Amino acid sequence: MLKAVRLNAVTYPTDNVERETLARAGAEFVEIEGQEPDEILAAAENCDALLVVSSRVPGSVIQRLTRCRVIARLGAGTDKIDVAEASRQGIVVTNVPDFCLNEQAEHTLALLLAFARRLPFMMESMRTFQWTARHHPGVHRLAGQTLGLVGLGASARAVAQRASVFGLRLLAWVRDPAKYQDLATKHHVELVPLDRLLSESDFVSIHLPLCAETHHLLSADRLARLKPTAVLINTARGAIVDEAALVKLLQQRKIAGAALDVFEEVDVFALPGKPAVHPLLELDNVILTPHSAGSSVESSRESKTRGARSAADVLLGIRPPSIVNPAVAPRFPLRADSLCE
């Protein structure tokens, strides 16, 4: 019998649809948390499919998955999976690239609006009977302000579509302007160099995957270009920003604030109740959420359903809809039709 091991079963509980889908592919379904390599290997060294939400799957683990045909990421980003090593081992890596576009865009706008209207400050003022909080000098009319989008992929375009309703001026930076010019025109976005975007924007929102080229893309030097009144929003990946440099700017009040759903050093994937110590948690000019931008009942179920179907596809010898390493030579050949079509 085939064996499918689902990681993060405590922090991201499994759904019956996962069990049923893998059962139809003839696989025993094993659930563990698996945040450490030894724990993963104890359950998965002889697996045929590995399903992962948030655990890190390094090359040292992948090299020992001698039967594994597929690593299915139940989400979009694969920066925690050594995809190159998986390819060398003939393991197909799949993901669900667009499962939470609406949720991420909604969360980004929620963070922007909450900061623009200083809602955390207003709430605290209500609790202490400070009625004059309505005169906060940082609250300005949103229409006419500038939102800078770092990236113009699907998530950034979903934000642009919603932000335009508020009358925001939209800028974006992309590495290949020619590739995105038609999309920028369609969404009324002006493509500009990154330094200009940072210096002109009232709100800067990050929409890029994490890779070698984007790690600390917003370095200390680049963050220093932000206006003193600017707010940085990050719902993408924490390490795209030099977090230590950002903390320093916030502590020194050199920017107005930050609204963060992702972090470089705060482990929001730890088991519930595990305490965290980080200077961001002590600041009063931030809004922090626990990597919940993509979360909803609907998106959670969709990621689990589609992720499990991709794993089942590979076990059945079918090419799944989204392969992260399309040039891989699979351990077992795959035909073109898919269960997900």
Image (cartoon, rainbow, N blue to C red):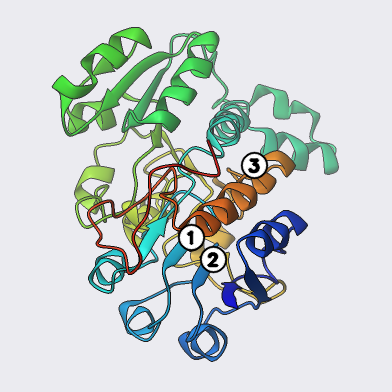
Q: For the N terminus, which image quadrant?
A: bottom right
Which residue, given by chain and number where applicable, does mark 2 sit on? 51
Mark 2, secondary structure of its residue: strand
**What amino acid is found at the position of numbered circle 1 in the picture?**
Ala
**What amino acid is found at the position of numbered circle 2 in the picture?**
Leu
Whichever of callouts 3 and 1 sits on the residue coming sooner in the sequence is 1
Q: Residues within 10 Å of mark 1 (few under 14, many from 20)?
A: many
Where residue 299 is drawn, which disc sits there?
A: 3
Q: What percent of the width, then of the height, locates residue 250?
A: 43, 50
For the residues bearing labels 2 and 1, Cβ distance under 8 angstroms: yes
- Residue at screen point 57% across, 75% down: 2
Q: Distance from label 3 to label 1 (Cα)?
A: 16 Å
- Residue at screen point 51% across, 70% down: 50
Q: Distance from label 2 to label 1 (Cα)?
A: 5 Å
- Looking at the picture, tell me which residue is in the foreground, 42 or 318: 318
Which residue, given by chain and number where applicable, does mark 1 sit on? 72
Whichever of callouts 2 and 3 sits on the residue coming sooner in the sequence is 2
- Residue at screen point 57% across, 79% down: 34
Residue 203 can be seen in this image: no
Mark 1, secondary structure of its residue: strand
